[in-house]
Amino acid sequence: MTHRKSDTTTSDLLGMSQEGLKTALVVRESYHTGDPVCVPDDPSKILLPEYLINTGLNLGEFDDPLPLAMMATRDPESPMALAAATRMSPKGSDNRLIAGVFGLVGEKTRHPLVKRAVALVSQNDFSPKSIAFVRGKASQFIVQTREQYSIALKQNLRALLDGDIEPRIFVREFFELTEAGNLRSDVRQNLITSLLLAEGVRPGIKFLMLENFYRLPIPTRKGIVSSVSEAPITRHIEMLKEELRWIISPERQAQVAHKAQKPKQPANNIH
């Protein structure tokens, strides 16, 4: 009992916890496998930048500086990384260790906006005014970015129906845009379901969409399977059902898991 109390006190002093470290490792693994980072205790909801910006929202272990630092440095999308850095910033105001980690985030992140946000807050000694300023700018950037991604999605869909974009390029950009735009799971599910069930979309495009089925959260996959199963029976719907049965089969799932666990080959360095 005494040892456990000592650990808790040490964690309080450091401003970090073992649970936060575990969560940071989970986040890192999500980036490695390409799986979305989801809301704690609710795998059906992808963690959105708005959740991180909202300081009144309890995010459990995601409020620890370590997972926030992981997202701020490793997340491929700048809105999410900026939101994580913004949520982390107040934690460095009265803790030198966290202030140091926050400074490392500015050095290691791949996003120039995060670098500037970290520099601004650090140079102003974590003042509430500088933190509020960064939070406001981050909120504006998130809204603007999502609008840009939504417009790009609509333009690509129109180009697909007009035959002005190759199906494989459309599908690749569809997933890139929906992931980068941090669309809600239900919105993404409705978009994909509509494409799969639309009569004006060629079957080949639908099968290309299903090739990326593994990139969706499990609840989203289940919703799509349910919608396709309940659709009126036609020849191409039967083909989709057969393809989905294969995709969710234990054999196929084992293949996908094995592929994800394979170590990536290092790129050849050019001297």
Image: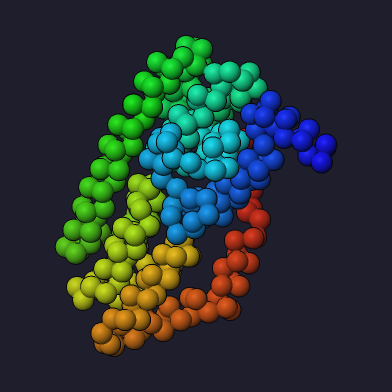
Residue drawn 18% across and 58% down? Answer: 158
Which one is in front, 270 or 61? 61
Residue 134 figure quarter: top left
* Residue 127 vertical position relative to residue 245 in the rendered view, above or below: above
Residue 270 figure quarter: top right
In this rendering, position of residue 58 left or right of residue 257: left
- Residue 255 location (% of width, % of height): 59, 72
- Residue 2 location (% of width, % of height): 83, 36
- Residue 44 location (% of width, % of height): 45, 59
Task: Name the colouring of the figure.
Answer: rainbow
* Residue 31 vertical position relative to residue 4 in the rendered view, above or below: below
Q: Residue furthest front?
A: 1
Residue drawn 67% across and 37% down? Answer: 17
Residue drawn 61% across and 20% down? Answer: 95
Q: Quadrant of the N terminus?
A: top right
Which one is in front, 227 or 129? 129
Q: Residue furthest right?
A: 2
Q: Quadrant of the C terminus?
A: top right
* Residue 180 vertical position relative to residue 240 in the rendered view, above or below: above
